[in-house]
Amino acid sequence: METKRIIDLDKLKLLKEDNVNDWIKFGAKVEKMLYYMFAPSGVSMAKFYLKGNNKDIDLFLTALGSEKKYMDAFLRNGLNDPSVLRSRYALERAVGRFELQTGIKWPLK
């Protein structure tokens, strides 16, 4: 049975820093999303749902996509390749915009 994995960005905005379990769960869900993005074909994708306003969701997906592009470039070219550095800077910009707009810390730093 597939589990629904919901990331509620509006709820995360309201969390306090001392609410560690919810932050760990958020990080685990993002990590799992990336896992499925890299999974070999034939591995069934879990169902993820995002809640929040459209701008926050777009920023989240941009940051997540930038994570994947950076990892792809790293795996393909190694750490010191210029394309990897460009991907890293693009990731940092996407994460910065996400954090600035939403006030939510990106879990994969």
Image (cartoon, rainbow, N blue to C red):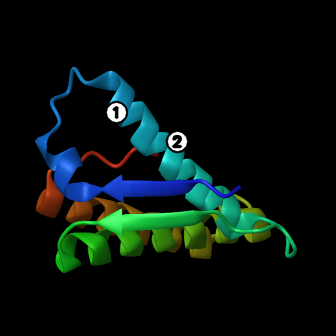
In the displayed structure, does residue 8 sit left or right of residue 102?
Answer: right
> Which residue in the rendered view is the most extreme toward the front?
1
The image quarter containing residue 8 is bottom left
Residue shown at 60% from the left, 60% from the top: 34
Q: Is residue 57 visible?
A: yes
Looking at the picture, tell me which residue is in the foreground, 62 or 39.
Answer: 39
User: Residue 13, position in %: x, y?
Assistant: 15, 48
Mark 1 lies on a secondary structure that is: helix
| Image quadrant assignment for residue 76 | bottom right
**Residue 98 sits in which quadrant?**
bottom left
Tell me the number on the disc at residue 28: 2
Amino acid type indicated by mark 1: Asp
Q: In the rendered image of this protein, does residue 68 appear above or below residue 58?
A: above
Residue type highlighted by circle 2: Ala
What residue sits right under mark 1 in the picture? 22
Q: Measured along the vertical axis of the image, is residue 44 above or below residue 105?
A: below
Instruction: State which quarter of the image contains the N terminus.
Output: bottom right
Q: Alpha-carbon distance for marks 1 and 2?
A: 10 Å
Give the residue drawn at x 68%, y 57%: 35
- Find numbered disc 2 in the image and state the secondary structure of the residue it sits on: helix
Q: Position of residue 97 (x, y in %)?
A: 22, 66
